[in-house]
Amino acid sequence: MGKAVMKKRIRFADIIIYMITIALALACLLPLLNMAAISFSNSAAATAGRVGILPVDFTVNSYAKLLKEAQYWRSLMISFARTILGTIINIVLVIVMAYPLSKSTREFYAQKIYMRIVLFAMLFNGGMIPTYLVVNKLGLCDTLWSLILPSAVGVGNVILLMNFFRSVPKELEEATQIDGANPFQTLWNVFIPMSKPCIATIILFCAVGHWNDYFTGILYISKIRNYPLQTYIQSVTASFDISRVTDPKKIQEYLTISEKTLNAAKIVVSTLPLMIMYPFVTKYFKDGIVVGAVKE
Amino acid sequence: MRKKKQIYYHLMMFPGLFLLIIFTFVPMFGVVMAFQNYIPAKGILGSKWVGLQNFKTIFTLRDSRQIFSNTIIISFWKIFLKSVVPVSFALLINEVENKFVKSSVQTIVYLPHFLSWVVFASVVQMIFSLEGPVNKVIGSVGLEPIMFLGTNQWFRKIIIFTESWKEFGYASIVYFAALTGIDPGLYEAASIDGATRFKKLIHITLPGILPIILIMLTMELPNILSAGFDQIYNLYNPLVYDTGDILDTFVYRMGMTKRQYSIGTAVGLIKSTLGMILILTANKLVTTFSDRRMF
């Protein structure tokens, strides 16, 4: 008797658990499904807020409109360019800095001083305004470089990879050095292959960061034609960017030209590269390699 | 050979260091603007030195007290939910036995973390708009619609809730990892002793992941001054400055919109200095009480 009751109770708990977890998963999918549904819906239905997770009066009108919007595709190309170039620069710099820093002071006498410099760069910064003034002074504003160079060195990633490099067995390194390899060759032939998962994770996060970043665009780019995609979307979807617009007439204008279905299409297309890559990359961050503190 | 190796190492450090000097260390000298009445045309060398005047102005402004408290209140609740929700979620999913459901749910909940706040904010705006689904429900029970993002009463709550919505899944990864690290023998022994599922949760699972919860909480400490610029920038408007304006948005508006470089830099300097102290404290705590460190 007792046993039967127990079994029933467990079943009941299981149902609750499954329901909650699945509801939570849906809550995470909903935003994107809703955006997609709106983008395929009739404009009137979308404005009236009648669209849920399925399109109302299915149409591809907004995508047809989007195809004709040259600036969108220009911004998309800018985002591709900065993501590819920016990520390459990020990862190369991370690798070449992490390697000497992973050496002991016996192997590399200046390791300590370099480490202090890098740590200080992580702990303290001049803030948004002085950085802006430097980028501006260098004449980088309104160029692709302003989106890439100021954040080219990810100090946190350098430290992450440095710790990973330290766990590579010493014998492997010594073996290549007996063969007369220089540090670049050792790094290339031993350390990089040994740290593939860590490097892949860093690449993933740098790429997502570049793709999603809108703020450096707002900060350093003044001409809309040079906007990266997220900055462009931000400028058209934010119902009104009040910090820039003070004229009430302009605000009105912003509100009336904001087209819900078209904006949804813009958002959906902008997340496509991410969605396509997503299934292939989940295994890298599932290992939890980037989260949590470094173990001593 | 040894000497030559040193040269290689220096060579490797050079490009990154060069960029760090230009884009991180040079701006650090820019903080002298906080002690000047900086005028762009005159530059740092030509602008007048005013000592601590800007800081005095900041501390007497009613706005700035508001901004500090907004920042701390918002980030406090965000940090609180960032441990409670992911931990509960990890514990829940740990009880799910179906492998397919388990791994699909996990994959899906990580997804919002990878969306930008530009994208997520437009979804949030829509859901909480006057015609949005939330107001539809409120309307259907006969209540007045609420301008969630336009009233001070609601703005912070929306900010805190939507942050948790976007990030809880990703934040739970570290707890999943900790859960798999618990010795299965403990559960078996408890089962033999007749422990219920709930008892096992209280006496084995929770104590098993408690250290990692405390570590993650400590590591969040420095974020108390950040409160999430990207999210708030994409959701706020002048109607909710009273409850939603934080240090970073204030610095941005001061510097980039009002061209009040000196005041903006001074607030930024206060933030970086306190931030540095908090990171060092958090690291000290983590290294003292666990076998881990932050850097």
Image (spheres, coloured by chain):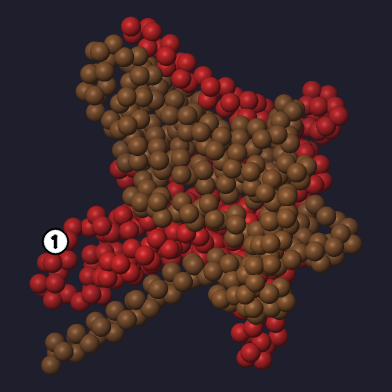
Residue A115, relative to residue B7: is it above or below?
below
Q: Which residue lies at the image location 53% right of the left edge and 25% below the top edge? A: B16
Question: How would you rate the neighbour count of disc 1 (Cα within 10 Å): few for under 14, some for 14-19, many for 20 or more?
Answer: few
Q: Which residue is mark 1?
A: B185
Chain painted red: B
Quadrant in which residue B35 is drawn: top right
**Viewer-closest of B153 and B124:** B124
Is residue B109 at least partly visible in the picture? yes
Quarter the C terminus of chain B occupies: top left
Left of B27 or right of it: where is A124? left
**Viewer-closest of A104 and A212:** A212
Q: How many marks?
A: 1
Q: Position of residue A211 (x, y in %)?
A: 57, 46
Residue A266, relative to residue B33: is it above or below?
below
Q: Which residue lies at the image location 17% right of the left edge and 66% below the top edge? A: B187
Quadrant in which residue A234 is drawn: bottom right
Q: Colour of chain A?
A: brown
Quarter the N terminus of chain B occupies: top left
Q: Position of residue B169 (x, y in %)?
A: 43, 61
Q: Which residue lies at the image location 33% right of the left edge and 69% below the top edge? A: B101
Residue B99, relative to residue A13: is it above or below?
above
Q: Position of residue A286 (x, y in %)?
A: 36, 53
Q: Position of residue B237 (x, y in %)?
A: 74, 61
Indicate the amino acid at tag 1: Gly
Left of B124 or right of it: where is A173? left
Identify the element where label 1 is drawn.
helix
